[in-house]
């Protein structure tokens, strides 16, 4: 992965690395200067247990997670140190800690961080325990660890307010980057020779990545302060800018479905070229907005591009006006016109949203407080909490998380005992190697294993060269291990092999600081890591394996339920006198997140051995149909946003909505319980009436298209809703047919909650 120096220095990981070494280095150097180097080291290590959780997030959430680690890590240290002389107590204690932390880690990203820090506490506790013979020394060391944790919490709270604006801007810039990627990928929809099935799967993947990026922003913006009232502040503007950016993606999602649908109606090369040019121009505008947030571009440089897009949208509207004049003479022209007209409307909506976003950055837009109210912010917080009922659902051997925890525990303890039996020093290194290599995903574990061994080998060589050159004492050792610690965190997510190089150097020079023999430490660092990696090779594939297609039923039905709820909320708001935009947006967010989780599960299956993947064609059809159903719901939701005064009062339309929602609910139930749905006479009758009304309204709007009368507009609204309901039926029916009699769904469970 290529990255230039400027990007490296401005990245989130690099900022995190600087924050970690600053928070740990201050007490280390201060206490060393005062003549307490060992105490300074323990305080620094205590700060390390907290610093790993110091990620960009809402301050209350961050403080809560840090408090968990502040309490758990000294307790782990005390209990392991006290049990160390008694193997009959130590080994069950180690196994219990490893199982519990490994079991909790997959439930959320943040608890994964807490679990990692707790595992680090296990490794360091084992390293220090052999030199702590007195109980008073154990509690004194634990007190220093606790003090270091308290210090870092205070330090992180201060840095939170200093760095927050930059962190928020960086994450919103990332959302712009992923949104641009979606628009660029969508440009292939305008190519007549494209493999549409693969393209739609690629778009679903882009959508999943983008919803993840949305959640990372929500994790920082939705709880600390009432930003919506501080519209003159940078963070207040960023909040509303982000809300508009989410709306833009929703509009793009609806447009993508409409563009795909036109290929079945018309191949109009001119219109498709104009639409492709507009799409690419929007992508360039988004790229320029990203560059502006990164202080690489002035908004004034956007003016020419904005003018070009306006010209293209005017040309598109003119072409459609010409097409409209031919409608009465040719019903086929009417079908073409009414297929492309919604796309033109959606494009205009996207341009309006973009202009609003640019105006927010310029300070010229009037903030729309109806779009996001202060009291609604808590509804958009990230769902990142451990729920007891969710945990209980995983207390079964059928759970992937339970099997993962067992696999980590058995493998780690095997590596620990193997090192002991061979008479090697520092068996805790072998144990910790297993803890960082093994992950719930097959591909991630396999890849990290190779990178870990390679990084450790290179790290030993580089550390040995530095040791021979500098022959460092306490001061030089502390400088080197802090610099290496920074490098480890700076490359943790960017390049795990390089991170392993730096972490190896950190451990070895930490031992030099403690006056341990460097050559012996380096030798056993590599041999223990290699031994643990060899054991992990067999563990990954053979020990309590769990393949992702066992959980696909949960992710599919979870996505279906969320989309069904989204449709129900849209329907309810269409009938309401006063629209509740918050309820609609929360349901939209939940549906998009659930679809993203389903797509990620599908991608993880593709990374597993082919013999364990199952029927990929079957799985891909589920992703395609589920994402298409969500896109159609976004179409109807966009109508809800565009027509806030519209009230769905026609009884026959309400009956169709009730029918399609009930049908979707029946399909969800059938997938969950692995049953079949029989086509009843009533269903056939409703479907027949729906198709007749669709044909009748299509003829009406073609006949009335010569003028924008109230009757024409009303008929267009009715036709749009009927058309979307009919489309939903066909998509849901395809999903029903593809899920019936599926062996994967027959074996899966919906009672084990993965989200």
Image: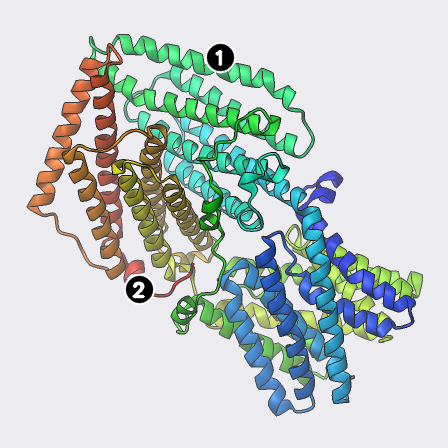
Residue 397 in view (yes/no)? yes
Judged left or right of residue 481, residue 291 is left
In this rendered view, identify the residue nearer to me: 14 or 646: 646
Of residue 112 and residue 42, the one placed in the foreground of this image is 42
What element does badge 2 sit on?
Answer: helix
In the depicted structure, whether residue 482 falls above or below residue 270 = below
Residue 672, horizontal then vertical, whole percent: 27, 59
Asked if labels 2 and 1 touch by Cβ distance under 8 angstroms, the answer is no
**Percent position (x, y) of residue 288?**
61, 27
Quarter of the figure that contains the N terminus: top right
Instruction: Work out which quarter of the rendered image holds the C terminus and state it.
Output: bottom left
Residue 357 at what x, y percent from top left? 54, 29
Q: Is residue 352 above or below residue 566?
A: above
- For residue 678, side relative to residue 203 (left or right): left
* Residue found 25% across the figure and 26% down from its top: 717
Q: Quadrant of residue 670?
A: bottom left
- Residue for point 56% across, 60% down: 110
Residue 293 falls in image quadrant: top right
Is 409 situated left or right of 604 in this image? right
Q: Quadrant of residue 96?
A: bottom right
Q: Residues within 10 Å of mark 2 (few under 14, many from 20)?
A: few
The residue identified by callout 1 is 311
Residue 265, percent across and down?
A: 28, 23
Which mark is on residue 747? 2
Mark-to-mark CA distance, 1 and 2: 56 Å
Mark 1, secondary structure of its residue: helix
Q: How is the image coloured?
A: rainbow
Residue 119 visible to the viewer: no
- Judge by depth and name the residue closer to the eye, 271 or 724: 724
Tell me the residue at 53%/75% (across/down): 99
């Amino acid at each position: 992965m290529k990255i230039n120096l400027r990007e490296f220095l401005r990245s989130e990981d690099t900022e995190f690395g600087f924050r970690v070494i600053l928070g740990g280095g201050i007490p280390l150097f201060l206490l060393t200067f005062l003549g307490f180097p060992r105490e300074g080291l323990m305080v620094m290590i205590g700060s390390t247990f907290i610093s790993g959780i110091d990620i960009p997030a809402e301050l209350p959430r961050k403080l809560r997670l840090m408090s968990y680690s502040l309490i758990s890590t000294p307790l782990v240290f005390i209990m392991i140190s006290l049990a160390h002389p008694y193997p009959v107590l130590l080994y069950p204690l180690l196994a219990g800690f490893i199982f519990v932390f490994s079991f909790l880690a997959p439930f959320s990203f943040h608890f994964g961080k807490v679990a990692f820090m707790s595992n680090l506490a296990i490794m360091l506790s084992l390293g220090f325990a052999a030199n702590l013979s007195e109980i008073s020394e154990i509690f004194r060391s634990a007190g220093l660890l606790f003090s270091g944790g308290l210090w870092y919490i205070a330090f992180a709270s201060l840095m939170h307010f200093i760095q927050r604006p930059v962190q928020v801007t960086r994450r919103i810039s990332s959302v712009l980057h992923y949104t641009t990627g979606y628009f660029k990928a969508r440009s292939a929809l305008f190519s007549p020779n494209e493999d549409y099935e693969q393209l739609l799967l690629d778009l679903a993947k882009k959508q999943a990545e983008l919803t993840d990026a949305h959640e990372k922003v929500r994790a920082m913006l939705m709880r600390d302060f009432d930003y919506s009232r501080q519209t003159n502040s940078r963070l207040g503007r960023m909040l509303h800018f982000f809300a508009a950016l989410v709306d833009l993606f929703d509009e793009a999602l609806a447009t993508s479905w409409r563009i795909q649908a036109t290929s079945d109606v018309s191949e109009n090369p001119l219109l498709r070229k104009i639409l492709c040019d507009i799409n690419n121009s929007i992508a360039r505008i988004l790229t320029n907005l990203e560059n502006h947030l990164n202080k690489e571009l002035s908004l004034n440089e956007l003016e020419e591009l904005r003018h070009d897009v306006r010209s293209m949208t005017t040309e598109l509207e003119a072409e459609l006006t010409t097409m409209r004049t031919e409608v009465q003479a040719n019903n086929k022209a009417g079908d073409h016109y009414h297929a492309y007209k919604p796309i033109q409307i959606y494009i205009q909506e996207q341009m309006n949203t973009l202009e609003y976003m640019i105006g927010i950055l310029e300070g010229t837009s009037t903030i729309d407080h109806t779009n996001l109210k202060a009291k609604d912010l808590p509804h958009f917080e990230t769902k990142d909490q451990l729920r007891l009922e969710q945990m209980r659902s995983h207390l079964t051997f059928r759970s992937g998380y339970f099997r993962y925890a067992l696999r980590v525990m058995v493998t780690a303890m095997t590596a620990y005992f193997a090192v002991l039996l061979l008479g090697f020093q520092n068996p805790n290194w072998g144990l910790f190697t297993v803890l960082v290599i093994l992950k719930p995903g097959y591909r991630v574990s396999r890849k990290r294993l190779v990178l870990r061994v390679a990084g450790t080998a290179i790290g030993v060589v580089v550390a040995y060269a530095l040791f021979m050159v500098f022959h460092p004492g306490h001061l030089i050792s502390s400088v080197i291990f802090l610099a290496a610690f920074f490098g480890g965190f700076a490359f943790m997510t960017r390049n795990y092999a390089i991170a392993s190089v730096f972490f190896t150097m950190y451990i070895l020079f930490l031992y030099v600081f403690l006056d341990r023999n460097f050559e012996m430490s380096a030798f056993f660092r590599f041999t223990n890591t290699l031994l643990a990696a060899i054991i992990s090779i067999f563990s990954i594939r053979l020990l309590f394996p769990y393949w992702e297609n066992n959980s696909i039923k949960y992710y599919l039905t979870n996505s279906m339920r969320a989309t069904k709820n989204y449709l129900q909320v849209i329907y309810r708001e269409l009938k309401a006198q006063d629209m509740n935009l918050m309820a609609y947006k929360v349901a939209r967010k939940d549906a998009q997140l659930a679809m993203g989780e389903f797509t990620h599960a599908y991608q993880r299956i593709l990374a597993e051995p082919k013999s364990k993947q199952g029927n990929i064609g079957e799985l891909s059809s589920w992703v395609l149909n589920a994402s298409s159903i969500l896109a159609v719901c976004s179409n109807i939701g966009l109508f809800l946003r565009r027509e806030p005064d519209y009230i769905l009062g026609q009884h026959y339309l309400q009956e169709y909505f009730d029918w399609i929602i009930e049908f979707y609910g029946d399909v969800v139930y059938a997938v969950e319980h692995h049953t079949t749905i029989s086509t009843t006479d009533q269903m056939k009758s409703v479907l027949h009436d729906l198709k007749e009304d669709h044909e009748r309204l299509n003829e009406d709007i073609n006949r009335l298209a010569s003028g924008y009368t109230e009757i024409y507009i009303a008929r267009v609204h009715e036709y749009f809703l009927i058309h979307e309901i009919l489309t939903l039926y066909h998509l849901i029916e395809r999903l029903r047919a593809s899920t019936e009699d599926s062996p994967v769904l027959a074996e899966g469970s919906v009672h084990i909650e993965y989200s």
